[in-house]
Amino acid sequence: MKPTAFEISNFLDSEEMIATYLNTVLEEGDEDDLVVAIGHVAKAVGMGKIAQQTGMSRTSLYKAFAEGANPQFQTVLKVLKSLGSEIKVSPIN
């Protein structure tokens, strides 16, 4: 029996799980990790749904959030908003 590849998007099934995942990546990863993580969340929610809400094409979204991509900050904010998420700033203690 052939093993299946692990897909994190299969486990991002609630707003709480999505928020925990993105916050963990923000705390522990770098900007490249965050871009890929947003892509995972968009895939979990549904790339077609995100495309419709942002006015972007599915193809553009897949390209923008692929490993090694460098999306514009405006694109990141649009997608996060469509996911019901936002970025907040707090002082580092």
Image: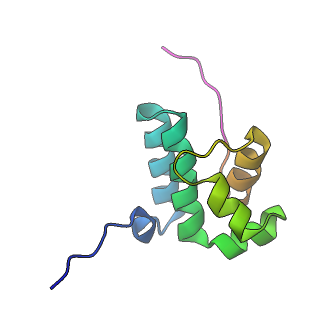
The reply, left or right, for residue 51 in relation to residue 13 is: right
The reply, left or right, for residue 12 in relation to residue 79 is: left
Location of the N terminus by quadrant is: bottom left
Nearest the eye: 66 or 34:
66
Residue 43: x %, y % from top left:
56, 67
Nearest the eye: 86 or 52:
52
Furthest residue to the left?
A: 1
Look at the picture and state if 82 lies above or below 29: below
Residue 30: x %, y % from top left:
49, 33
Residue 91 sits inside the magenta stretch: yes
| Residue 54, quarter of picture | bottom right
| Magenta stretch prevailing secondary structure | loop
Q: Residue at x 61, y 53 (%)?
A: 65
Residue 62: x %, y % from top left:
63, 62
Viewer can see residue 83 = no
Viewer can see residue 2 = yes
Q: Residue at x 60, y 24 (%)?
A: 90
| Residue 57, quarter of picture | bottom right
Furthest residue to the bottom?
A: 1
| Residue 66, quarter of picture | bottom right
Furthest residue to the right?
A: 55
Residue 59: x %, y % from top left:
70, 67
**Please, which colouring scheme is shown?**
rainbow
Stretch of the chain drawn in magenta: 87-93
Q: Residue at x 45, y 66 (%)?
A: 9
Task: Count the labels in the image.
Answer: 0
Look at the picture and state if 47 lies above or below 76: below
The reply, left or right, for residue 47 in relation to residue 55 is: left
Nearest the eye: 39 or 20:
39
